[in-house]
């Protein structure tokens, strides 16, 4: 017994009796969110309660933890050192305590999935139906994004981000479904015109962004002449304009196929070999509920299988 007591004293475990361990969860939230408001929302505290907890954390650790810098806040060196070991300790504690498994039949959480508008057009309907059927008390929140930033993968309560394989992710990714680029044109175009004929003869409807749709660089490398007739800011208006106003556009096959249920579109394969445009899943690295992750991952694959 004496040996065990000495071991506990030597490791500092005896001092934990005087420490409020309930502060560790909001502390991690604060260090990861770098915002008292967002941290409070994440752990279910009011902002005054979170500010009070911050004061106690500073007293406990003898460090300011977060300091104002311009319009935002920054972490002290001590706070930055705490993130990895604190996250690891809390994850291990959750496994030791062995909280009840995620129960989709009764869980009332908000399930947040970020994706582009075009991806939402493809997966949104079935995803919404499956969430309603399998997690009837949960709320699905679809966040539409354009080009993801590093904050996209962790901010605003996001659980998982669906991004094109062409976009960068600082975290591991897993393929959800494959896609490819196709040529879409009005059904009034000459039926014997090939995809290459359509691309050279018809005015193009192009999304007006700084980042040109990838296959255009392939056309330019091969010296294929084309003319941009219309620039538009909303990606999902492209197939509608093509079908009803004429012209040609480059579009994801999944979007074009789904849009055919709404407008009459001619779809042809892109005339040159190009890499695919698959959609990947990137999970929020702060999400520690593995039961929920496994359930949602299986549901997303179910959505993809029926595309």
Image (cartoon, helix red, strand yellow):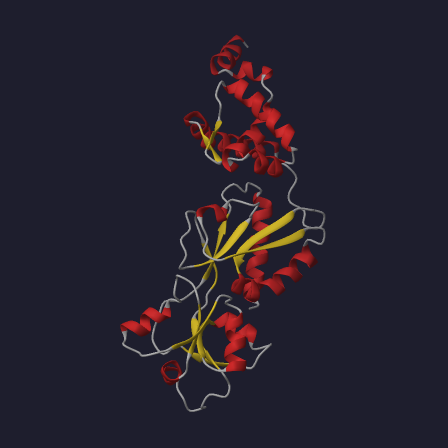
Q: Residue at x 56, y 45 (%)?
A: 156
Q: Position of residue 23 (x, y in %)?
A: 59, 26
Q: Nearer the viewer, residue 2 or 60?
A: 60
Quadrant into which the N terminus falls: top right
- Looking at the image, residue 278 lies above or below residue 223: above
- Looking at the image, residue 161 lies above or below residue 274: above
Task: Say which quarter of the image contains residue 276.
Answer: bottom left
Report if residue 22 is visible in the image.
Answer: no
The residue sitting at the front extreme is 70
Q: Nearer the viewer, residue 138 or 15?
A: 138
Q: Position of residue 271 (x, y in %)?
A: 36, 79
Q: Position of residue 220 (x, y in %)?
A: 30, 73
Q: Residue at x 55, y 66 (%)?
A: 122
Q: Position of residue 207 (x, y in %)?
A: 45, 68
Q: Residue at x 49, y 48 (%)?
A: 153
Q: Nearer the viewer, residue 39 or 286?
A: 39
Q: Residue at x 59, y 15 (%)?
A: 18
Report if residue 145 is visible in the image.
Answer: yes
Q: Nearer the viewer, residue 55 or 194?
A: 55
- Looking at the image, residue 20 lies above or below residue 44: above
Quadrant into which the C terminus falls: bottom right
Task: Say which quarter of the image contains residue 218.
Answer: bottom left
Instruction: Count the numbered circles shown.
Output: 0
């Amino acid at each position: 017994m004496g040996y065990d007591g000495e071991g506990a004293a030597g490791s500092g475990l005896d001092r934990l009796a005087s420490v409020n361990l309930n502060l560790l969860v909001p502390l991690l939230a604060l260090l990861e969110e770098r915002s008292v408001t967002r941290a409070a929302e994440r752990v279910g505290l009011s902002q005054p309660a979170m500010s009070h907890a911050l004061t106690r954390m500073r007293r406990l650790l003898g460090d300011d933890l977060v300091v104002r810098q311009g319009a935002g806040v920054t972490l002290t060196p001590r706070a930055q050192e705490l993130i990895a070991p604190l996250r690891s300790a809390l994850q291990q504690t959750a496994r030791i305590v062995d909280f009840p498994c995620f129960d989709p039949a009764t869980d009332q959480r908000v399930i947040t999935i970020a994706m582009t508008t075009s991806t939402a057009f493809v997966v949104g309907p079935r995803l919404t139906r499956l969430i309603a059927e399998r997690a009837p008390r949960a709320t699905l929140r679809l966040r539409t994004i354009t080009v993801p930033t590093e904050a996209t993968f962790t901010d605003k309560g996001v659980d998982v981000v669906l991004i094109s394989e062409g976009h960068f992710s600082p975290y591991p990714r897993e393929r959800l479904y494959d896609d490819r680029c196709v040529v879409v044109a009005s059904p009034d175009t000459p039926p014997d015109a090939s995809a290459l004929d359509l691309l050279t003869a018809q005015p193009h409807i192009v999304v007006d962004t700084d980042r040109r749709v990838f296959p255009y660089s392939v056309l330019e490398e091969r010296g294929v002449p084309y003319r941009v007739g219309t620039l538009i800011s909303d990606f999902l208006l492209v197939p509608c304009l093509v079908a009803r106003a004429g012209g040609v556009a480059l579009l994801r096959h999944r979007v074009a196929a789904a849009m055919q249920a709404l407008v009459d579109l001619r779809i042809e394969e892109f005339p040159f070999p190009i890499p695919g445009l698959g959609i990947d899943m990137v999970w929020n690295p702060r999400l520690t509920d593995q039961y929920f992750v496994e359930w949602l991952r299986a549901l997303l694959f179910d959505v993809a299988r029926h595309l």
